[in-house]
Image: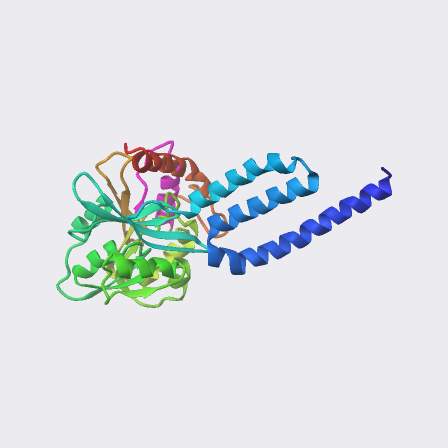
Amino acid sequence: MSAETAGLISGKVYAISTVGGIVSTLLCGFFLIPSLGLKITLLAFAILLFITAVLVLKIFKANSAIPFILVLLFSLKTMIGNDNGSVIYYKHGIMGEIGVAEYLTEKEPIRQLLINNIVQTEMIIRTKRSTSDYIKSIDSIVPSQTQTSNALVLGLGGGSLSNLIEEKNYKVDAVEFDPRITEAAQKHFNLSSTINCFNEDARSYINHCNKKYDLIIFDLFKGEEQPVHTITAECFQKVSSLLAVNGRMIINWHGYVDAPLGKGTQILLNTLHHSKFNVNLIKGKGGEDHSNTLLVCNTDPNIYSNDNELVNTDNKPVLELANAKANLRWRLNYLRYYQQGK
């Protein structure tokens, strides 16, 4: 093959690949994923590419290709189908899958809100209360108000925390990025109708908000991940301006505080001190692998901040990398607990 012919063929391959990439990106982003979901779209493309390779490259004879196609079709059916009759709500979209499922435990039935099959909220159906220990801890440290106060909850989930705070005589504003989660909370987790829900990014809400709050809670975990753009020095400085006199901020965090897995936590503490917050750590009772840590913060203009310590900022986001090992450990413990029953 001459160099001219090789170049011509390579050019055609790149041209077809580029056109295919543009078309598939637009098709998936605006039609297939919102309509069919991520799993079906990916498997459909996998089958299409497999059949194309078989036909174009003639890797297999027609009869020998059939078993491979059947395997792919069976995989598609397995991922689309749901033999578990406990699923009572399901919606897919560009941001993943949202589901609500009910399970009968050894004690009593529970209801779970799942994002991409990761449990976000777990509620006892009979009592309509969360099973999460960190919410019980918040219940113990946030007293009921003698007069109506304002609270901001960043991260709605099933709404158990927002309901709890409202019961303590707070008027609650809850911010949730995904409107499907808000819908699931309202329909299946008894979210109070008097809670004001805002479907937007938490940082965006903080940036344009001018309301004063007596209590602000960061409950933004998505699986093992924390949206680090909401826990920068610049964000905390804006939050400080939203807190009323004697107002408090509470951050729900993972259980790793000490080295080596607690490196991210130490950077978070540095960032809070840099933003003039005094912090009280409340560790869960289950040990670092199985419990959350609450950071209870109040503004203190006189707090000492060491300029040589790492701080998470918008221009230099260092927290995500520092938190990577802790997040991995958190995910492995999650899988061990929920999928292996340990």
| Along the line of sight, the residue nearer the viewer: 60 or 107 | 60
Q: Residue at x 76, y 44 (%)?
A: 10
Q: Residue at x 57, y 58 (%)?
A: 27
| Along the line of sight, the residue nearer the viewer: 68 or 5 | 68
Residue 187: image location, x then y, percent? 27, 61
- Identify the image's colour scheme: rainbow, by chain, secondary structure or one colour: rainbow
Residue 207: image location, x then y, percent? 41, 63
Q: Is residue 319 visible?
A: no
* Residue 86 is inside the magenta segment: no
Residue 202: image location, x then y, percent? 38, 58
Q: Is residue 144 above or below residue 56?
A: below
Residues drawn in magenta: 252-274
Q: Is residue 152 above or below residue 15?
A: below
Residue 155: image location, x then y, percent? 33, 55
Q: Is residue 166 above or below residue 277?
A: below
Q: Quadrant of the C terminus?
A: top left
**In the displayed structure, does residue 227 sit left or right of residue 140?**
right
Q: Residue at x 65, y 35 (%)?
A: 61
